[in-house]
Every structure is written in C-alpha cells, then in structure tokens.
C-alpha cells in the first residue's frame, strides 16, 4: 500500500473526535436552534397528544394591595385579594365581618335615631281648596275645603270642614270630628259626628264611614250619616292625581250627596240632592304650596222654601291655592 492511501484514513480517524466535540458545543450555545434530523419514513412513530394546558393562576392572588407607607398601627389589616383558584362555582366572596359593632340601644333611642316608630304621635293639616269662583251667570263665591289629623299610623283624630260663602253669606258649611282606625294598608274606618251650619238651621249628624286608596290610586271616601227625626244621608267622594310632570298635576274630583228626606229650610231634596264634578290643574312650587286653576260643574235638585222642585245646573271657573302645613 502506498503512503498516500494510508495517510487519508488515519487523518479521518484523528479528526472524528474533534467534529463530535464541535457538535456538542453548538447545541450548548444559547439562542441557536438546530433542526433535528428527520427519521426515515418507514421509522416514523405518531407523537402522543399534548395534555391540555392548565389555566394560568390569577397573578394577583394573595397579593398585598396595601399602599406604600400605609399606617397599620391602628390594628387595621392590609387588604388581601382572594385566591380565585379556590372560589366556589358562583364566584361569590362573602364580605368581611364588620370591625365595628353597634352598641346596645334602647327602644326609645332606636326610635329617635331611625325615625321608625309606628306608635309615634304626629299631625298634618291640608287646606286642599281655598278658591275664588265665578259662575257663568256672573256670581262670585269663596269656597274652602280642609282636613287635618293627629295621632299614629293606626289611630287618628280627624277634623274636616267644607263650605261656600257668597254675597248673601255662608250658604253651605259643615264640620266633622272623626276617629279613624286603620284596618288595612290603604283603608281606615271612621266614626264621629258632623255639624251643618250657615244657611238654614244647624243639623247634627252621627257619622260612620271609610276612606282610603282604591285600586289605581283613587282617593275615595264613603260616609253614612244618621240625624234626628229619622234623617239619614250618604256622601261619596273620589279624586285622582294625574301627573303631567312632577310639579304639574291635574286632579279630577267627583262628590255626590244623598238624603232620605226633604229639608226645605236647608234647600235639600230627597234622593240625589246635589253633585259636583271638577277639574283643577295645579303647579306645585313645593309639596306645601300649589296654586291652581280649574272648572267646576254643579247640580242641585232644589227644594227650598218658595222654590219649585226642579234641578239647577251651574258652571263656574275657579282659581285658588292648595296649602299643606
């Protein structure tokens, strides 16, 4: 064998360890990716599926959210965010227990602080109508209607009055003193007395009735009266507040009066003696003060002294003020 043919194999065997060391050094160098050798096609094996990645944990879980420099010398604990990995299915976290406990309070102190005494005594006075009217015939009149009460939410003493005064004097006037007892959320029974005055002789009555809010917020009253000499009467009244705005309110109102006997000295006839229907539009500068204008239709079945037994109708324009004290 020639020397040339012997040197080439010996040189290859001497360089093989150096090549292997160079490959290992290349794999260890950071930032360098070397493609892996692809195995022969007939030797390929299916790679197993990778397991599903677990959701990342909340990066803020267990983190102290207190501000730097916050003073905890008073015993307050730093705010720690809850670990969301252990939350229940609905993700609800119960609030922390209050650090301050309310001291023991007497019933009187609790009523004074919370203003929730159902048996407390208070009162109200409402001048619902104080108005000046002019009829289509040119007659002027001044009318009033007021009511007030004093008591609790369950038992109250009511005072009601209504009347009309013309150039000849007071024509119709009545005053009632009633005891009211709440029988349900929106209804009161009332028991008391009524006194008619002004035009004609005064007439006393015993009164029994009910008042409250009917469905759809209709303010309703129904009262039955018993007087001397077998006299009886019934009075029905209903009204409703229709709000165009929180201050502009239209109030339709209907009042019916029935009597069992004629009373010519007080211009009262049996049956439907008189009825009134009105519309009043008021503007509430506040809940306590509201001027208004409106129109009123009146029906009276006259049966007075020297008058024929026939109905009369009258339309009047009104302007007045509503005051709540």
Image (spheres, grey):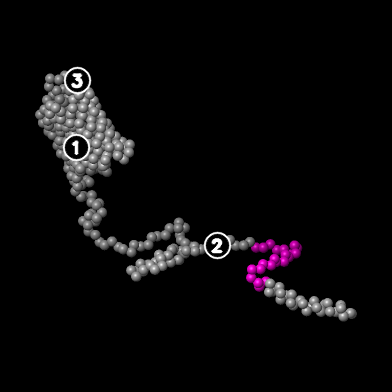
Highlighted magenta segment, given as a residue range: 27-48
Pick the front one: 186 or 239: 239
Residue at the disc numbered 2: 54
Where is 165 relative to 28, above or below? above
Helix or strand or loop: what does disc 3 sit on?
strand
Quarter of the figure that contains the N terminus = bottom right
Residue at the disc numbered 3: 310
Helix or strand or loop: what does disc 1 sit on?
strand
Q: Which residue is farthest left?
A: 201
Residue 43 - label: none
- The residue depicted at 63 percent of the width and 61 percent of the height is 49
Pick the front one: 162 or 293: 293
Residue at the disc numbered 1: 146
Pick the front one: 29 or 101: 29
How many callouts does the rendering have? 3
User: Is disc 1 surrounded by few (<14), some (14 to 19) or many (20+) residues within 10 Å?
Assistant: some
- The residue depicted at 33 percent of the width and 68 percent of the height is 74
Q: Position of residue 99 (x, y in %)?
A: 33, 64
- The reply to whether dot 1 and dot 3 touch (C-beta < 8 Å) is no
Q: Position of residue 64 (x, y in %)?
A: 43, 66
């Amino acid at each position: 064998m020639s020397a040339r043919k012997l040197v080439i194999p010996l040189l290859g065997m001497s360089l093989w360890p150096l090549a292997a060391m160079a490959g290992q050094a290349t794999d260890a160098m950071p930032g360098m990716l070397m493609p892996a050798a692809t195995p022969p096609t007939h030797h390929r094996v299916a790679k197993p599926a990778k397991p599903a990645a677990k959701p990342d944990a909340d990066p803020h879980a267990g983190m102290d959210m207190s501000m730097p420099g916050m003073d905890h010398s008073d015993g307050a604990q730093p705010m720690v965010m809850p670990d969301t990995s252990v939350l229940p299915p609905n993700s609800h976290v119960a609030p922390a227990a209050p650090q301050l406990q309310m001291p023991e309070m007497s019933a009187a102190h609790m009523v004074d602080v919370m203003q929730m005494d159902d048996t407390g005594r208070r009162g109200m006075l409402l001048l619902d109508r104080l108005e000046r009217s002019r009829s289509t015939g040119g007659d002027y009149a001044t009318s009033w209607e007021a009511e007030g009460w004093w008591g609790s939410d369950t038992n109250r003493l009511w005072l009601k009055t209504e009347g009309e005064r013309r150039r000849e004097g007071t024509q119709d006037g009545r005053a009632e003193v009633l005891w009211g007892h709440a029988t349900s959320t929106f209804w009161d029974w009332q028991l008391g007395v009524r006194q008619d005055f002004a035009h004609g002789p005064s007439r006393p009555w015993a009164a029994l009735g009910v008042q409250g809010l009917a469905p759809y917020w209709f303010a309703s009253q129904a009262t039955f009266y018993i007087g001397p000499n077998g006299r009886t009467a019934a009075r029905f009244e209903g009204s409703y507040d229709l709000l165009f705005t929180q201050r502009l309110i239209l109030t339709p109102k209907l009042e019916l009066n029935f009597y069992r006997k004629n009373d010519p000295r007080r211009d009262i006839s049996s049956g439907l003696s008189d009825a009134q229907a009105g519309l009043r539009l008021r503007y509430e500068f506040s809940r306590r003060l509201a001027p208004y204008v409106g129109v009123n239709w009146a029906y009276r079945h006259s049966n007075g002294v020297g008058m024929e037994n026939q109905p009369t109708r009258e339309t009047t324009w009104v302007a007045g003020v509503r005051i709540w004290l």
